[in-house]
Image (tube, coloured by chain):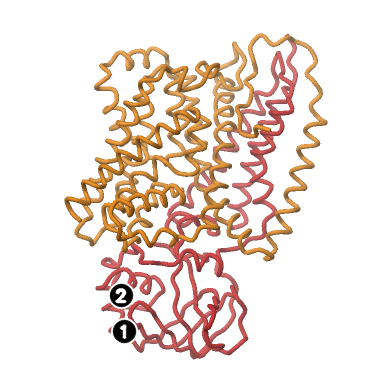
Chain colours: A red, B orange
Amino acid sequence: MNRSWSPQRVATGVVLAGWAALFWFVLLTGRTPLYLSSRTAWVAPLGAILLTAAAGGRLLSARVRRPAGLGRGTAWRLGFLALPVVVLLVLPPTTLGSYAASRRSLVGGAFGASARDVSTGEVTLQDVAAAIWSPEAAEALTKRAGSRVSFVGIVVHREGMPADEFLLTRFIMTCCVADALSVQVRVVGAPPGKFTEDQWVRVAGTFYPLGREVIVQASEVVGVPRPARPYLQV
Amino acid sequence: MDLIGTVRPEAPGRTAGPAPRSWPIVLFVVLALGAASLVVRWAASSRFPQVDNFFLVFGSLLMEAFPFVVLGALVSALIEVFVPVRVFERLARLPGFLQVPAAGLGGFAFPVCECGSVPVARRLVVKGLRPSAAVTFMLAAPILNPVVLGATAIAYRGRELMWAMVLGRAILGLLAAMAVGWVVGRRSREDLLGKGRAHDHGEVEPGERRWSAFSGQMAGDLVMLGRYLVVGAAVAAALQTFLPQSFLGGLAGTPVLNLVALMTLAAVLSLCSESDAFVAASFVQFGPAAQLAFLVFGPMIDAKLVLLYSGAFGRAFTRTTAIVAAAVTLVGALWLEVLIG
């Protein structure tokens, strides 16, 4: 019996190919760190390869003896499955910002404070996060008050803050953006009005841990491009 | 319109002849997708930070979970096409009281997230495994697998309660999964899968070659569960965007309600079971019992899983699973609260 193309199979194959294209796009444009941490980044190539194979398999077996037409309901359902592909492909690359910072504050994070030796080496925002959670890490950090630091993050203003202050904010993720939590340090002595909300900056200065808050007396604040890995990792 | 209902399988015995014209509806759907993309692009141009936030969380949940659904669909198709029915008939002959715990412990050997275990469990039921065993496996695997328990140990390392949290998560997770399995096991296979779906053949014609049947099964599972995952990820992203994580913080010191609060939060956040321990450990104002409730309940019930379960097994199953899992988790966590405070 002659074989002909099954519209339903072709449509399914095209939608799966769209999903594969999304994963390849994210991989090839270097956008994986915008969604996934380095410990889960391997799922992106896995998804790309498996979806390519799934789409190829469906399209290669799309010629059948008794082709089924593509009903209206099935077409809409497949269109619905394709919707996230279209949406994620057209969205500009972006990261969590000040809106998320107010909702994802680090009430204390499991950032391996016991393993991380806060007392030596360069002070990082991970150290600050560890100090919020662990009293031992906080004590170690307190001993380093007055050290020179250099942090990169986004500018977040809160109501009532003096004009020369802002919260330097960075998000720390474990697996993906859904689990990201913000760590913040209060920057004082910044040039008033020079930096806009959500702008990426590098702050150099002297840091002073005060209880659960860390203050950085800025000696230099400069705008920088968004880092290739905008989220810190656990 | 039911956008997430089942794609009709290519029914055997369909009459030969010209297929109905498909291009007008395809064109209409493509135009609708184009319009949707323009609206999203306009809304996301920093006009509304909520829109950016929503799509970032939505995208990251899909990027992380979709490959696991693909993997689950792949395993499901392998089981359907390449594992002989007699294997499942042999398993089904094992005594019932052994099947459920064995299926739960089988979760140790299946290191995937919760999204991947759903299509596998569904296929196991279709192939004839007892529903109680398949459901127990589905709920236990995302909690008991070595990657998840290892991540839990890392998240709690340096704390006195590290082993209590790791073992508590494994034991309570296994008990809750078995309890749901036993309750759900009273239903028949047809009840669980829905009439007409108990002999699901995906997008497969009778007499197709094996690789073609494999491709059809995989595509069928993927298309069905993928849509539920999209809706679940959207719900989770909306909850994360519009509900601040501190919204339940006021209940931290209230007995029982503190457990309910973190179980609710686990369902809202819809985190992957491999990362949730790091988030749970950060809720320092809540006690270890509440954190354990978060770790046990989250991988069994969350916004995206509710949609996936509904697609695979129906709403009644989802309701039962939510109630039993919540009850067992709550009782177990209360015991822990009494024991260790």
- Vertical placement of B170 versus A140: above or below? above
Task: Quadrant for residue B143, please give it.
Answer: top left
Disc 1 marks a residue whose amino acid type is Arg
Q: Amino acid at mark 2?
A: Val
Q: Quadrant of the N terminus of chain B?
A: top right
Query: Image quadrant for the C terminus of chain B?
Result: bottom left
On the image, the x and y values in percent for residue A91 come to: 67, 56
Q: CA separation, marks 2 and 1?
A: 9 Å
Q: Chain of mark 1?
A: A
Instruction: Check the image and name the residue furthest to the left.
Output: B339
Q: Determine the image quadrant of residue A5.
A: top right
User: Is residue B278 positioned above or below A73 on the image?
Assistant: below
Q: Quick one: label 2, few (<14), some, or many (20+) residues within 10 Å?
A: many
Residue A118 - label: 2
Identify the element where label 1 is drawn: loop
Q: Is residue B69 above or below residue B97?
A: below
Residue denoted by label 1: A144
Question: Residues at badges 2 and 1 in contact (C-beta under 8 Å)?
Answer: yes
Q: Position of residue B146 (x, y in %)?
A: 31, 43
Q: Are marks 2 and 1 on the same chain?
A: yes
Q: Is residue A217 left or right of residue A29?
A: left
Q: Which mark is residue A43?
A: none
| Label 1: few (<14), some (14–19) or many (≥20) C-alpha neighbours in 10 Å | some
In what element is the residue under mark 2? Answer: loop
- Can you say whether B172 is above or below A8 in the image? below
| Residue at the spot 56% in from the left edge and 88% down from the top edge | A163
On the image, the x and y values in percent for residue A206 come to 41, 88
What residue sits 74% from the left and 28% below the top?
Answer: A72
In this view of the protein, which residue sits in the foreground, B71 or A68? A68
Q: Position of residue B17 (x, y in %)?
A: 78, 12
Q: Is residue A156 left or right of residue B253?
A: right
